[in-house]
Image (cartoon, rainbow, N blue to C red):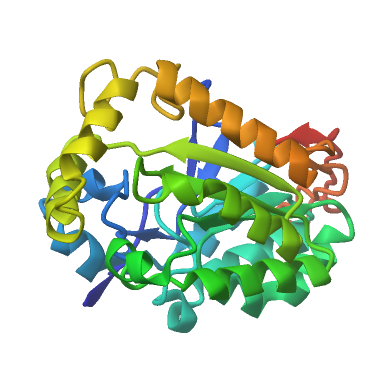
Amino acid sequence: MQVFEERAKSILTRNSSPDIPFGVSLNPYRGCEHGCIYCFARPTHSYLGLSPGLDFESRIYAKINAGELLERELEKRSYQPEPIALGVITDAYQPVERNLRITRRVIEILSERGHPFAAITKSSLIERDIYLLASMAQKGQVMAAITITTLDADIVRTLEPRATTPSRRLHTIRALTEASIPVGVSVAPMIPFVTEPDMERMLEACAEAGATSASYIVLRLPWEVAPLFKGWLAAHFPDRAERVMGRVRDMRGGKDYDSDVSKRMKGEGLWADMLKQRFHQATKRLGLNQRQRGILDMSEFRHVERPTGKGPRAVLDSAQMKLF
């Protein structure tokens, strides 16, 4: 594995897709050591002239000036604050973060400015920053989302080879909850006949650990991800590979993937509807998604300009804004 330092030109990405529950995201890294075979972000390495396969998980680009760019962005008088989703494309807490601490610096800046965010991860490394997150949580400025794919550690070893184990992720949910940090879970991706049968047990385990909300995403196979996933499927589940892909196509209008924003996250058709019903019945039974979710308080955001000698620092107050 190699890590390359990158001086990015910008750090905040704005989104307008109706099926994505946030408007602004920040990703400190390109590529991801976790090596999740299904990762929808793999094709982004093609833009760098690298392979979405092995290169994506072994050639990591670290945006070493992420903190500097974020500070510069927040200092702009034109900046309109809204909650930031941290680590959406690749995990902000992947193993390389342990030494580089780019994500840590980003969180420190957001904490100093009173700027809310949501951290999305499948890594236990987020526990390192609990005291910062807990302080922000007291002010309604942060929430965490832990991704869990299956409770089967044997499947995880090949599906997400360098990610945290399922039991460790449940421990992380407990640790965050005990620190009074709101925690949701993302059951994703839902892989028919592989992780899908485990859905109810996963939700039960997460609810028991302290999660209060849950969401799910059906397997997505855009561009180069499809052949990579099919290769994994043939190697590890040859007995059901055809059934899995057949069911995937049932939910994608006969194709491996449909990018239509009204369908890409949940799929369509009878099986997708049945999955949706199972999910909602389980979350209702477990008391998940019963509270108002994702209201993050923007009222303490401080728009701080660099000292110029022309007057005091300016403070910008804003209303609460919804992330999820």
Q: Residue at x 68, y 42 (%)?
A: 83
Q: Is residue 122 left or right of residue 229?
A: right
Q: Nearer the viewer, residue 190 or 198?
A: 198
Q: Position of residue 115 (x, y in %)?
A: 74, 51
Q: Nearer the viewer, residue 112 or 215?
A: 215
Note whether 56 is above or below 2 in the view shown. Answer: above
Note whether 14 is above or below 161 in the view shown. Answer: above
Residue closest to the far front: 239
Tell me the quadrant of the picture where the N terminus can be found.
bottom left
Tell me the quadrant of the picture where the C terminus can be found.
top right
Question: Can you tell which quarter of the image residue 196 is in?
Answer: top left
Q: Is residue 262 left or right of residue 296?
A: left
Note whether 294 is above or below 108 in the view shown. Answer: above
Q: How many marks?
A: 0
Residue 281 visible somewhere in the drawing: yes
Residue 307 visible somewhere in the drawing: no
Question: Can you tell which quarter of the image residue 175 is in?
Answer: bottom right
Q: Position of residue 8 (x, y in %)?
A: 36, 55
Note whether 149 is above or below 224 in the view shown. Answer: below
Residue closest to the far bottom: 99
Q: Position of residue 163 (x, y in %)?
A: 40, 70
Q: Residue at x 36, y 17 (%)?
A: 260
Q: Nearer the viewer, residue 254 or 100?
A: 254
Q: Residue at x 50, y 30 (%)?
A: 275
Q: Position of residue 20 (x, y in %)?
A: 53, 30
